[in-house]
Image (cartoon, rainbow, N blue to C red):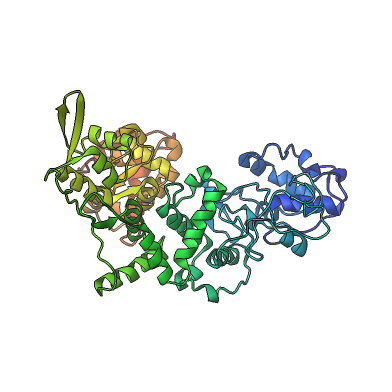
Amino acid sequence: MNRSEAVPIISSPIKDESLIGYLIRIAGLNAYESSAWPLRHVGLSYAKTKASTWRSKLPELASILGQPLEAISNLAPLNTFEGNHSKVTLLNGEAVSRYFLKWPTKAICSLCARENGYLSSLWDLRFVTHCPRHGCKLRDACSECGKVVRFYRTSIDFCECLSAKAGGDSSISEAHIGLLRLLSNKYSGTKFDLARFGFPELIQRASCREVLETIALLGTSLHREGDPDGRGYLRVSEANTIIHVSDAAGALANWPEGFIRFIGKMIAPTDWYLENEFFAFGLERLYRTCSTQKERFPTVYEGFEAYLRLVSEGRAPYIHNTVVPSPGRHQWLVSSSDARNWLKVSRAGIDRLIRKGLLQTITIRRGRRVDRLVTHESLEAYNDLKKRLIGIGAAAYMLSISLYTLKELVRAGFVTPVHSPDLDGNHCWRFDQKVLEGFLYELEVHADISKIRPVQLIAAVKKYNKQGLSYVRLLEMIREGEVELLMYSQTERGFLKFGVDPEVLHKLFNDEGGLGRANLTTVRQRRTGLVNG
C-alpha cells in the first residue's frame, strides 16, 4: 500500500463504536467528502454489504486506517465463531447467533450521537429499537429538516437541526427501558442502575447471549413469529419485534410477579371442552424448552418453579390439558375442526398429521359432504408426543453436534425426526426427545471403559476429515465392528461423552489418506450391536 492511500489523521476506535460509525468519524476528521473513501481502496462499497466480502477485506481496511486488525474486526459482527457461520463474536468474546444483529443498521439516536461523538454498535442489535438512555425510538429520518440517514455522510448525526432531536413513538414501558439498559450493560459495559426494575438475579448475572435468547424465547411464546435462536426474526417486522421485547420485559420485571402475570396471558379458556382451562401451545412449548434446557434458560425455569409452588399451595388455578368431549358430541370422536383448535394447528397441519398416521380418523359420508372425525385416543397420544418434541437447534445442542451433522445423521438413518420438510412437508424440524435420549443411552450401554486414553469423537472427525471421516462414517464403522466405541467422559454432553482408540484410527487411516482395508480384519473382533436411532 502506498503512503498516499493511508488516512492522514488516524484515531483509535472507541470500545463499542460501530464500523460504519467509525468510518464516518474518520472521514470527518480528515475532511473527506464521503466516508466511503477508505472502502474504495480495498474494493468495498456501502451498496454491497455482504458479510463474507467485508470480512475478507478487513486486513486491507485496517492497514489503510492505521489500526490493528483486531481493533477493526471488533467493530462489526463479521467474525464467525469457530467456523460456524451462524455465530458471530461480540466485543466481550461471546458467541451469539448472527440473526440477533441487523448489520448494517441506519437507525440511530441523535441525542446519544451528539453527546458521545460516535455511533454505538449496540444499535446493531435487532432488539434495540429504542435508546436505553433517553427512551426515544431510534430514527433514520428527521421530520423537521427532511434529512435521511446516509452511510456516505461525514458527520456523526445525519440531522442538520441545531439541537439534537429525539425520535418519535417513544411510548414504551418502564420495564422495556429497563430491559434495554440491561442489554446495554451486558453488551457495551455501561453502568445503568437496574434496581428499580426488579429483574431477577439470574438474568442480571447472565451473559449477553443468555439475555438475548431469553428475550427471544419469551417473546415467541406469545406470538407465532420468531424463535429462540434468532433465525425467525429475519421475517419479523420492527413493530412486532418491539411487541416481543415489551412482553419479555413485562415478564422479567418485578420478579416473580411479572412472570406469573406473563403466564396468565398464555392460559387460554376454551368453549369446546366444558369450559376447562388448558395450557396453550405456546405455554407448553415454553415449559418444555426451559425444562429440557435449564442451563440455557435458567431464569425462565426459575419462574416456572415459582409458579408451580403457588399451584401446589393452592394459590394459583390448577391448569390441565385433558380432552373432554363437548356436550352432545361423540364420546370417542372429535371433529377435525375441534382437533385443529385443540392442537393449535392449521388445516394443512392436521392433514399432515393424518397422512403420517399420527392421528387416526373415521370418515363419515353425509350426502355429498364427507366429514373426518379424529379419535380421542390418537389425539391424546399425539399430545403426549408433542410434549416431548424439541426443535432442531435443541436436538443439536443435546447431541453436541452442528445442525449440518444432525441432518446428515437423519439422512443416514441414525436419527429419525417426527416432523421435517422432507418427511411430512413441515417447515420446522421436530425431534422426539425421548428417542434421542434412547439413542444416547444405547451408545452408553455399548461404550467400554478402556485403560488407554481414547480420543474424543469430535477430535477424531476433525483429524481425519480430509480422509473422509465424518460422524456418519464413524458411527457406521462402530456399528459394523470396525472401531470400538469407548467412554471418554461421563460429565460431558451428547457425543462429547464418547471416544475411540486413537491407535486403531491411525491403523485404519494410513498416510495416503484412505482406509487401510487390510487392517480391518485385525480390529473386527467385537460387534457393538449399535442399531439405528
- Of residues 81 and 173, the one nearer the viewer is 173
Q: Residue 3 in the image: x percent, y percent?
A: 86, 45
- Of residues 215 and 519, the one nearer the viewer is 215
Residue visible at 28% across and 58% down in the picture: 451
Along the horizontal axis of the image, is 457 left or right of 244? left
- Of residues 278 and 395, the one nearer the viewer is 278
**In the rendered image, the vertical position of residue 83 relative to residue 277, given as above or below:** above
Image quarter in which the C terminus is found: top left
Would residue 154 be visible to someone looking at this image? yes
Q: Residue 87 in the image: x percent, y percent?
A: 52, 49
How many discs mark residues in the rendered view? 0
**In the rendered image, the vertical position of residue 85 relative to residue 267, given as above or below:** above
Q: Residue 151 in the image: x percent, y percent?
A: 74, 45
Q: Residue 100 in the image: x percent, y percent?
A: 54, 51
Would residue 97 be visible to someone looking at this image? no
Residue visible at 81% across and 42% down in the picture: 37
Q: Quadrant of residue 163?
A: bottom right
Image quarter in which the N terminus is found: top right
Along the horizontal axis of the image, is 495 left or right of 47? left
